[in-house]
Amino acid sequence: MNGSLTLDFSDVLLSEHRLFDYEDKIAKAEARLHSGNEKFTGWADLPLTYDRDELKRIKEVAELVRSKCDAFVLIGIGGSYLGPRAAIEMLAPASSSPSIYYAGQNLSGTYHKQLMEELADKEVCLCVISKSGTTTETSVAFALFKDWLYGKYGKEEARRRIVAITDAEKGSLRQEATEEGYETFVVPANIGGRYSVLSAVGLFPIACAGINIDEMLDGARDRAGNNEQEGLYAAARNCLYEDGKKIEVFEYYEPRLHYFAEWLKQLFGESEGKDGKGLFPAALAFSTDLHSMGQFLQEGSQIFFETILNVVSPPDDLLVPESAGTILANKSMNQINHAALSGVMAAHRAAGISMVRIDIPSLCSYTFGQMVYSFEKACALSGYLLGVDPFDQPGVEHYKAEMRKVLEK
Ligand code: PA5
């Protein structure tokens, strides 16, 4: 349809036999993932088995929301926020309506007060997302915005402007949604936050932004059919880690990929960073960060490898005028951006840096679906190869318990 994501390993400095040595382990990891016996692996077959009735309802409710509001506020954090934001920032034109706003992804009073001020004259709908229904950031922001919505529209109408996405049965948000009669969707019990983009968690807000979610699921489904490259990527990541490369730097040249990279940080960070192990996922925006971090990459401690997100055909372009001088004049900005990518790769090749290049054909919903599935799969396989559980996040609970102690004082 819109071209396939391709992973290029020609700049990964590993001998072929090391990757081939992983073949058996990858096959075992793959079988384990699809065995049906592993907790939180519901995402792996989701694009192939998606409930068509739910998909229809997601689209219907999204259309209703779109007809009702010019401001849609997504309240959530972590896996209940980053995936939909990654899609919306990558795919929705800035001018599209409704405008999408985010709340509950931090605890800043300044941010939330200013957001309320900005929304004062707008027609607003809220979508609160929380699997547990108890996350502090989400609960605080939802309480504030719900009160604000009651004040703006009265209780009856405000309730019709709230959609809750949460567990089917558990948690206080589910209870409240039932009591108050909010429209709801379910976070599947067998899918964790960072793997939930292609469930209602992502699909509903993404549809509210006017993005084609059918094509997104098509992309994911097509990718699910063949994961040879994801297996190789997982093997390469593990070999490089064994060789002392403890950081994976995701690099992108299109600003629209900023939140996709944020989601990648969560996906890999929470999935692999445990038991004293794991690659530290970092992200750099090029060419911006070449002027701040380029020096370190070229000549600093060689504790990293790079994964480059290369958009082959970006959605728009500009021709550079004569006044820019002979080298630049009459070239398109995308040409110059691609020259930056080629130049950086040549320089880093000379420095002996390993690089995986991922060619993303274009920024469309079909490709987004492929990207999400591809990285989820690679991450799950990598986690198994590393010997950790890629689907839990016990360490996240610690700070929450400490924060509660402070609040209770
Ligand atoms: O991936 C995860 O599990 C976390 O990032 C959660 O999504 C995040 O903590 C929010 O949790 P909840 O959806 O329960 O509010």
Image: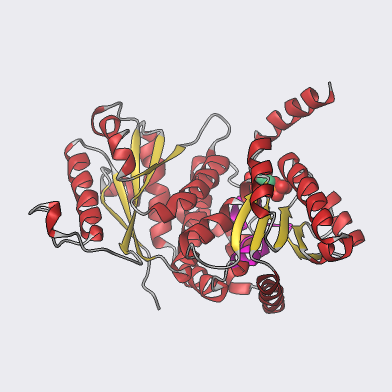
Determine whether, in the image, residue 273 is placed left or right of residue 320: right
Assign the N terminus to one quadrant of the image.
bottom left
Instruction: Spot the residue most to the front.
Output: 121
Q: Residue at x 73, y 55 (%)?
A: 128
Q: Residue furthest right?
A: 179
> Does residue 171 appear anywhere in the picture?
no
Using the image as rendered, state which of residue 49 and residue 360 is in the foreground: 360
Front residue of 54/234: it is 54
Above or below — where is 104 with respect to 84? above
Relative image position of residue 104 (x, y in whole percent) = 68, 45
Which residue is depicted at the point 36% across and 34% down? Answer: 245
Q: Was residue 170 drawn as part of the magenta stretch in this picture?
A: no
Residue 329 sits in which quadrant? bottom left
Quadrant where the image shows the C terminus:
top right
- In this view of the protein, which residue sits in the foreground, 232 or 317? 317
Name which residue lies at 68% across and 42% down.
113
* 141 lies above or below 129: above
Measuring from the top left, give residue 85's x and y in whole percent: 56, 55
User: Could one spot residue 321 in this view of the protein?
Assistant: yes
Residue at the (36%, 39%) spot, across then down: 240
169 relative to 18, above or below? below
Percent coordinates x, y for residue 78 in the rendering: 62, 46
Question: Is 186 situated left or right of 12 in this image?
Answer: right
- Stretch of the chain drawn in magenta: 189-206
Colour mapping = secondary structure
**Residue 196 sits inside the magenta stretch:** yes
